[in-house]
């Protein structure tokens, strides 16, 4: 029988460095506390999903460094009982000044997987440096991945940068979601849009290296208030969903998805196709995280139906 490795490895942790990114130049001072990338501040996680000798999708490999933690794959999805599901956790609480993280998620040929986070990701107040994340998501031929993490909460004076590279075979499908809150609404007098900077970049590629699209947004509330008309206006939450999929899949989902504005529920939804027949870009603005997450799950369910013929199950009540 084929063997799969679930052992903690000792390979070197990849370097995570954004010092050459212009918008981060004001935040390069070494923290007075633990230095940038110190043990416990340089997290690494590698997940590899594959088929075993019986054709079942399994979590083939986990490689993790504190504070990032990942459990073994669980099979709790009633609609796709053969899909391993995994939560990413952190032993260190919120992201703090000088943290550096990298997450590599690989789905091998014809395998599938579901990844989320155990709770919302908090970005603590920062005084000297910033917190940075690199994500590499790779899908081979016929692979399928749902990456639906909980929201990200920036606190006062948060500095955060994230770069996500999606390398996807034309026959594979990935649903990649990110939800950004505006701050801790009920903490003290509130911290709505009190963070210093969010720099977020996502780009899609084919396995041979061809770049299909690139999207980057930089939010600096002290320089340009996101609550302006034409930006976020009255809304407090911004969500981004990227779907890279075969043309017949994303065209079906696009035809079934109508943009709308529901003032009563505080939700606005938009959708567009990505360049170079890469897939779809789905955006949501909202005022309540529960409503935003439901809209995203409903959209992800349409994608799953188009690929697997099964919807997403009802979300757990505790989520």
Image (tube, rainbow, N blue to C red):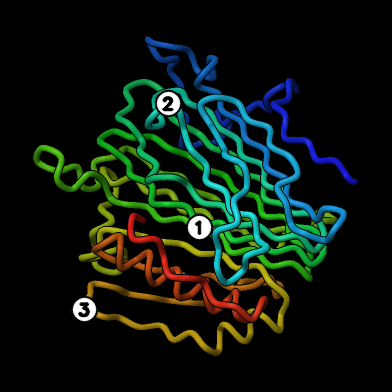
Farthest residue in the right direction?
A: 1
Question: Which label sits on residue 148?
Answer: 1
CA gap between label 1 and label 3 equals 25 Å
For the point 78% across and 36% down, which residue is it? 5
Farthest residue in the bottom direction?
A: 255
Name the residue tied to disc 2: 92
Asked if marks 3 and 2 touch (Cβ < 8 Å), the reply is no
Check disc 3: other Cα within 10 Å, few if <14, some if 14-19, many if 20+. Answer: few
In what element is the residue under mark 3? loop
User: Nearest the camera: 174 or 223?
Assistant: 174
Name the quadrant containing residue 81.
bottom right
- Left-right relation of 284 to 244: left
Asked if marks 1 and 3 touch (Cβ < 8 Å), the reply is no
For the point 44% across and 86% down, which residue is it? 258
Percent x, y for residue 131? 45, 31
CA gap between label 2 and label 1 equals 21 Å
- Left-right relation of 156 to 25: left
Mark 1 or mark 3: whose residue is earlier in sequence:
1
In what element is the residue under mark 1? loop
- Left-right relation of 292 to 54: left
Q: Quadrant of the C terminus?
A: bottom left
Mark 3 or mark 2: whose residue is earlier in sequence:
2
User: Nearest the camera: 257 or 216?
Assistant: 257
Asked if marks 2 and 1 touch (Cβ < 8 Å), the reply is no
Name the residue tied to disc 3: 263
Check disc 2: other Cα within 10 Å, few if <14, some if 14-19, many if 20+. Answer: some
Name the quadrant containing residue 311.
bottom right
For the point 31% across and 64% down, which residue is it? 231
Percent x, y for residue 144? 69, 64
């Amino acid at each position: 029988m084929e063997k799969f490795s679930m052992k903690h490895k000792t390979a070197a942790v990849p370097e995570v460095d954004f010092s050459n990114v212009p918008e981060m130049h004001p935040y390069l001072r070494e923290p007075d506390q633990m230095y940038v990338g110190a043990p416990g501040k340089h997290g690494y996680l590698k997940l590899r999903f594959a088929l075993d000798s019986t054709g079942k999708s399994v979590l083939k490999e986990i490689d993790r460094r504190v504070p990032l933690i990942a459990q073994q794959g669980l099979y709790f999805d009633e609609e796709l009982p053969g899909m391993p599901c995994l939560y990413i956790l952190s032993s260190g609480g919120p992201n703090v000044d000088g943290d550096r993280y990298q997450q590599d998620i690989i789905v091998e040929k014809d395998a599938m997987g579901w990844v989320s986070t155990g709770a919302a990701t908090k970005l603590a107040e920062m005084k000297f440096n910033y917190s940075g994340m690199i994500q590499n998501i790779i899908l081979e031929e016929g692979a399928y991945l749902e990456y639906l993490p909980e929201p990200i909460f920036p606190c006062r004076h948060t500095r955060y940068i994230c770069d996500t590279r999606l390398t996807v075979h034309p026959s594979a499908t990935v649903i990649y979601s990110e939800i950004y809150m505006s701050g801790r609404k009920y903490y003290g007098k509130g911290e709505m849009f009190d963070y210093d900077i969010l720099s977020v970049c996502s780009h899609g590629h084919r396995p041979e290296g061809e770049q299909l699209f690139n999207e980057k947004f930089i939010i600096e509330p002290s320089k340009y208030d996101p609550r302006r008309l034409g930006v976020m206006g009255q809304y407090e939450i911004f969500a981004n969903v990227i779907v890279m999929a075969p043309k017949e899949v994303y065209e079906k989902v696009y035809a079934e998805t109508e943009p709308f504005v529901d003032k009563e529920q505080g939700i606005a939804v938009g959708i567009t196709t990505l360049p170079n027949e890469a897939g779809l870009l789905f955006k949501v603005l909202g005022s309540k995280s529960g409503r935003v997450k439901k809209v995203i799950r409903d959209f992800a369910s349409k994608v799953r139906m188009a690929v697997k013929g099964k919807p997403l199950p009802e979300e757990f009540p505790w989520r």
